[in-house]
Image (cartoon, rainbow, N blue to C red):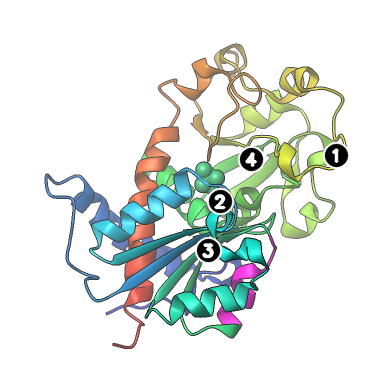
Amino acid sequence: MAELSVEHLLGIKYLKENDIDLIFRTADHFKEVINRPIKKVPSLRDITIANLFFENSTRTKLSFELAEKRLSADVINFSAGQSSVKKGETLIDTVNNILAMKVDIVVMRHASVGAGVFLSRHVDAKIINAGDGTHEHPTQALLDSYSIREKLGNVKGKKIVIVGDILHSRVALSNIFALQLQGAQVKVCGPTTLIPKYISSLGVEVESNLKKALEWCDVANVLRVQHERMDIKYFPSTREYTQLFGINQDILNNLGKKIVIMHPGPINRGVEITSEVADCNESVILNQVENGVAVRMAVIYLLAQQVKR
Ligand code: CP
């Protein structure tokens, strides 16, 4: 049976194109499973998974939990807010205590860049990064690419613009790695203050004019402004941001072509995207959420094949 080239899913930058291909082919199978009347397979009855969320989440946390349950794994959930982390326990002590309960796979979201890599070096479990600070969010990028492949047939050769707060976005970085690995072209569009200085070193062009960016692309992946990661003002006002970088129906109507609209969520309706656009026929936002379960089932299933039983 084909195997992933990695022992953990810590970031897209560690993957090869064949890994993404294998994850997508496996996700195709699980997508069919989750659309059956009985949406469950017994594949991981002997696997225990801990979901450790040290940062807030709606989609990723629920999607992982559902993916694990659809695979029949035993699941435990941990949220930092109600835990002994508040009493001063270290990350490694917290995780080793959880692993002593015979856990095979840890899914972790953490505010610190590199938290997943750090954990993978210190504990004996498979680690899946569910978002580490402003760094990577690999399963989000995988489900985004999977959704493009589903909508347009292929990712190779497609033009994708990522619009918004690129500087603070782990979704942007993981998407850039994933899309380029599959042969897509990527541009970013947003206020200069929210574009990282290293972006050209990734082979990514910057287009500061939203209309030109949308005219160029096949797909626009729209990101929210991450106010919670900002300690200074990066643009004068939300109103000005929306005027320059918000996507509305008028802009789309004037393109003379249809483009696919994506958003990883959570959406700030009326800021980076209007409700009309978020809910339009070209929007695949809810397809992304559905595909997230199938893609996460695939990642968990493939890593679980490497667990010594
Ligand atoms: N897309 C995403 O990561 O959403 P959550 O923060 O709700 O998990």
Q: From this viewpoint, is residue 22 visible?
A: no
Say what amino acid the circle numbered 2 marks.
Answer: Ala
Residues at marks 1 and 2, CA–CA distance in whole angstroms: 25 Å
Say what amino acid the circle numbered 1 marks.
Answer: Thr
Magenta segment: 112-121
Give me the disc on residue 108. 3
Disc 4: which residue? 162
User: Does 110 sit above or below residue 9?
Assistant: above
Question: Quadrant of the image for the N terminus?
Answer: bottom left
Count residues near mark 3 (Cα–Cα under 10 Å), then give few for <14, some for 14-19, many for 20+: many
Mark 2–mark 3 contact, CB under 8 Å?
no
Say what amino acid the circle numbered 3 marks.
Answer: Met
The mark that comes first in sequence, 4 or 2, is: 4
Q: Secondary structure at mark 4?
A: strand
Disc 1: which residue? 193
Determine whether, in the image, residue 120 is placed left or right of residue 279: right
The mark that comes first in sequence, 1 or 3, is: 3
Disc 2: which residue? 184
Question: Where is residue 14 shown, x and y percent of the image?
Answer: 57, 72
User: Does 222 sit above or below residue 278?
Assistant: below
Question: Where is residue 211 shown, x and y percent of the image?
Answer: 69, 23
The mark that comes first in sequence, 1 or 4, is: 4
